[in-house]
Image: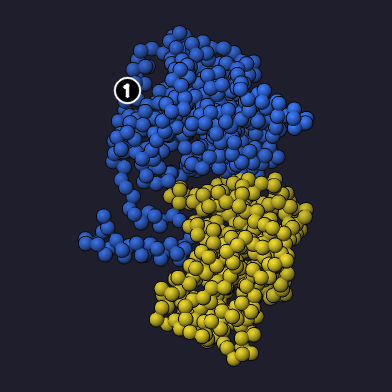
Chain colours: A yellow, B blue
Amino acid sequence: MAGQLSIAKALNEALRKSLESDPKTVLMGEDIGKLGGVFRITDGLQKDFGEGRVIDTPLAESGIMGTAIGLALRGYRPVVEIQFDGFVYPAFDQIVSQLAKMHARSLGHVKMPVTVRIPYAGGIGAVEHHSESHEAYFAHTAGLKVVTPSNAHDAHWMLRQAIASDDPVIFLEPKRRYWDKGEVGDAADLPLHSARIVRPGADATLIAYGPMVKVCQEAAAAAEEDGRSLEVVDLRSLSPVDFAALEESVKRTGRGIVVHEAPVFLGMGAELAARLTERCFYHLEAPILRVGGYYAPYPPSRVEEAFLPDLDRVLDAVDRALAY
Amino acid sequence: MTVKSTARARKKAAPGVPDNLRAGSGSAPELVQLLTPEGDRVEHPDFPLTATPEELRGLYRDLVLVRRFDAEATSLQRQGELGLWASLLGQEAAQVGSGRAMRPGDYAFPTYREHGVAWCRDVDPLNLLGMFRGVNHGGWDPNEKNFHLYTIVIGAQALHATGYAMGITKDGADDAVIAYFGDGASSQGDVNEAFTFASVYNSPVVFFCQNNQWAISEPTTTQTRIPLYRRASGFGFPGVRVDGNDVLACLAVTRWALDHARSGNGPVLIEAFTYRMGAHTTSDDPTRYRLTEETEAWKAKDPILRLKAHLDKEGLADEAFFAEVEAASEALGLRVREGVRSMPDPDPTLIFDHVYAEPHAQVAEDRAEYIAYAASFEGGEHH
C-alpha cells in the first residue's frame, strides 16, 4: 500500500485492513455508514462490510460507549467513532469509570479491546465544541492508553495497533491534519508507545504531539535560518509516555519546550516538564518551558489563532530557553 | 396545549400521587400476580405457570438461603468485617424468580444488590463480599457463570447488557440478557439510552427494574409521574408490571420475557413492584425519610411467608423439608461468617496487577517505586 496518502485516507485504509483481518472488529458511531463519517474516515466501509460490521448508531454518546463495552464483553473488538471532541463528554463515565476499569475490576478476567476514535483539537474554524483538546482527562485515567498520530504513516500503523490492543485506546485524530499527505508504508510492528525524533538538533528539544508536531517542525526550520539547531520529538503516545526517549534528548540538548494546543495549566506539558526536571536536572541549562492554550474555554474561531500556539510563540519560547 | 393550561394541569396533579405510584400500593389492576399474600394461587391469562411441588420447594429454599446470606452480611458489616453492605431484604422474590427464569446461556448484568440473582447463577456468595470487605472491586470471572460484575454507577450496566445482547444477535445465538436496575436508575440517561439502542437494534435484552420504592431517600414519585413499566411503550417495546414479592409471578413473567427476547421479538421491560425492607445500605437511615406504617404494610406481603403459606396450605412440604432448609441456612451462615473472617487482604502490589492487559510503562514504573519504598522499611516490608 506504499504511496502518498492523506491522514484521512490512511486511517480509512487501517480500518479496512482491521475489518478484513478480524471478523470480530466492528465500527460504531454516528453517520459512519452511508455518509462515511462527517470527515469521511469510514468512507465506503459500510458498503463493503455491511451494516452489521459498520454500525450507524443512535445519537447518544454514552450509549455508543456503553454498548461497545457490552460488545467487547461478548468477544467483539469495537472501534467507536465520536463525531467531534466536544461530544465525548456525555460518554465520559462510560470511558473513565467503566471502560478503563473493567479489566482491573475483574482481576484480569475481562479484556476491553475497544478503540475510541476522536477527531480532536482546533484550527479549522469550527463552531463551539468542535475544537477541544481533552487528552489530559484521558491520560490521567489509568486503564486507558492515549495516542495521537501526527502524520499519515503513523496514523495507519498506530490505528491498526490500537485496534489490535487488548486494552482500551483513546485514539485522538488531529482533524486539522486530516488532509496532510505523506508516505504510508505497511503497518510497522512498533510498540504503540514509542516516541520518534522527527528532526535531530542540538540546542533545544521541542516536544509535541498530534497537530503541533508540524508547527514545531516549521519552527525548527525557521530557527535553522537563525543558526539554531532544534530537535523535534513526536510523542505519539500520551499514555504511556516514552520518557526514556525524552530524557535522552533533553539531556543532550539541555533544554526542553513542550508544545500542545490544550491549556497549559495542568495539561500534558505540566507532567512532562515536572518529570523531565526531576530526571534531567543537572543537565538542564533552562527550565522546561511550556507553550499551549490559555486557561479559557476554546475561543470563537475568529480569534482561535490567538489561542493556538503558532510558529512565533514556539520560537519565542526557544528564545527564552536559550537566554538562560 | 398552551403554557397556561400545562401549568394548570401540573398544579392540579401535584398534590395527589397516582394510586399506582404510592409506595403502599401493590394492588394496581395491571399488577401480574400468581400467588396472593395469603399464599393462594391465582391464574393470570397471559402468564400461566405450572410448577411442580419440587420446583416450589426449590424456590422456597432459594428465598430462605438468600435472605440468610443477606442477614449474615448485614451482621458482618455491623461487626466491622465488611465496610458496607447493600441489603436485598424484601426483594428476594424478584431476584430469585427472575434469576431462576434464566437459562445457562443467558447473561445477567446486576447492580450491586443482586445477591439473589448471583445465588441463582451459582456464584459463590463469598465472591460477592470481596468488594464490600475492600479486598477487590469484584474479582470474579463474569463469563464463568454469565453473571457480570457489580456496577456501582447507577444504570451504567444497562448499556453493557444491551451491547452484549447486540453481540448475541450478531452471533446468531439463542440466548438473552437481563439488565437489572432500580427505580432510581430509570431516571438515568444510560438506562434510557439502553432502551433506545435495544429497541432500534431489536436486541434480546430484558430490562428488569426492581421498583423497591426508594432510591436512598427519594421516593419513586421523584423519578417518574407515570408507572415505570409504561416507559417501555414510548421506546416501542412491551412493559409489564409484576408483583415483585411473588416469586411465581416473577418467574413466569421473566421466563416469558426472556423467550420473547431470544425469539427475535426485541426487548421487554419488567417492573417488579416490590419494597426495600431494610436500609439502602448499612450507611443509610430510612427512619429519617419513611414511615413505619409503610414498612409494616409491606411486611404483610413478605415473599417468603406467602410461599410458605402456600406450601403449608397445599401440603406440598413436610417438617423434614423445613428442617433441612433451616439446617442449610445455618450451614450457609457459618460458611459466610468464617469465609469473610478468614478472607485475606491482598498483597498491596495488587494495585498494579490488572490496570492493563498489556505492559504499560507508567504502571511498571509506579510498581517499582512502591516495591522499593516498601523494601526500605525494616524487615523489608511496609506495614
Type of amino acid under label 1: Ala
- Which element carries disc 1, helix, strand or loop? helix
Query: Please, is residue B246 above or below residue A195 in the view?
Result: above
Q: Residues within 10 Å of mark 1 (few under 14, many from 20)?
A: few
Query: Please, is residue A145 above or below residue B315 in the view?
Result: below
Task: Looking at the picture, tell me which residue is in the foreground, B199 or A238.
Answer: A238
Does residue A27 appear to the left or right of B247 in the view shown?
A: right
Instruction: List x then y, in percent, for residue A236.
Output: 57, 69
Instruction: List x then y, in percent, for residue B279.
Output: 42, 30
Q: How many marks?
A: 1
Does residue A185 appear to the left or right of B128 in the view shown?
A: right
Instruction: List x then y, in percent, for residue B172.
Output: 65, 41
| Residue located 41% across and 38% down the image | B128
Subunit bearing disc 1:
B
Image quadrant of residue B75? top left
| Residue located 47% across and 63% down the image | B360
| Residue located 60% across and 68% down the image | A293
Q: Which residue is mark 1?
A: B327
Task: Looking at the picture, tell me which residue is in the foreground, A247 or B342.
Answer: A247
Residue lying at the far bottom of the rendered structure: A227
Does residue A127 appear to the left or right of B103 in the view shown?
A: right
Residue B98 visible (yes or no): no
